[in-house]
Image: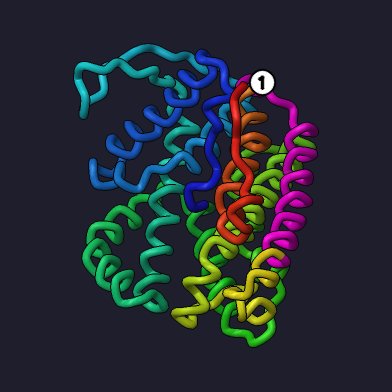
Amino acid sequence: MLGYVRAFKPEMKIKDFELYRGVYCSLCRALGRLYSPVAQLFLSYDFAFAAILRLASGECGCEFSKKRCPYNPLKKCMICGSRKELDFCAHAVVITVYYKVIDNLHDGGIKSKLLAALIYPVVRLMHKKAARLAPEIDKIIGNAMKNQAECEKKKDVCIDEAAHHSADALGKVFSIGFEGERKNSLYNLGYMVDRFVYILDAADDLEKDLKNGSFNPFAKEYSDISDPEIRKAFAKRAEEMLNLTQSSALDAMDSLEKKRFEDILENIVFDGLTFSGETVLKKYLPAEKKKTYRVD
């Protein structure tokens, strides 16, 4: 996930936003505790969503307490005491970053390769520990990255095929440790959220990928993206795909038995994803037709 999966603060209650930030801060602490302060640089709200989702689905309760932030001692943060799921997500962060670094070393641009080469020794050490502590996550993500790379080498790859491997991996990671209907719901939700992110990221990077010659599942059909009519047609098609995927994600979330954080999850999957989609797609629309958010 790439920064698109986050809460939409204007539609959140203050108490829910505090809990949301509390899980984010707790995951940050877990990364520092397990892997060093360097690992905290890889934290994103995408993984905070994963932590909230697994915390919401588990049987154990969540106790929060206020503690001072080590990087800002004047500020107190809500900290979640449920270490099991936070540690699980911390392992997933490190493993995901490791395989992303490997991918950039092989197929990234010059800047991406240089940055990947710089951080690779540190990330490799962290990955060794993460793979030992969470071998199932490592196997799932490792296989997905390998299959994704092979998929992108094909000449004609549709968006469904291109998005499948990472979406399947996230669905499997989300559902590890659960059984029955809850496992199915978590898998479907993870799959659809990652599919949404993949489509949105491909749309966001289309112009850059066309310029650089990088893989993009939309590149062949919309190679002349500078044409205003093609831009509008592309925005419409991408919006339709995102809406259908988001609708499926909401259906999966509705079918999930949640013990807590229901309002937060609904905000992220509905308001948050909607805002992310509109923010990306508006650059393909004429200025007068760009969507804006207004508070009356």
Where 235 falls versus 30 (above or below)?
below
User: Left or right: 97 with respect to 251?
Assistant: left
Q: Quadrant of residue 231?
A: bottom right
Residue ID at (40%, 33%): 27
User: Left or right: 273 with respect to 105?
Assistant: right
Where 59 falls versus 3 (above or below)?
above
Residue ID at (38%, 69%): 102
Residue ID at (42%, 55%): 95
Residue ID at (50%, 21%): 17
Q: Quadrant of the C terminus?
A: top right
Q: Nearer the viewer, residue 207 or 84?
A: 207
Which residue position is annotated with label 1? 259
Q: What is the span of residues highlighted in magenta in the rendered image?
A: 233-262
Q: Position of residue 243 (x, y in %)?
A: 75, 49
Q: Position of residue 99 (x, y in %)?
A: 42, 63
Residue type at numbered disc 1? Lys
Q: Position of residue 248 (x, y in %)?
A: 78, 46
User: Left or right: 149 with respect to 111?
Assistant: right
> Does residue 200 appear in this view?
yes
Where 264 falls versus 34 (above or below)?
above
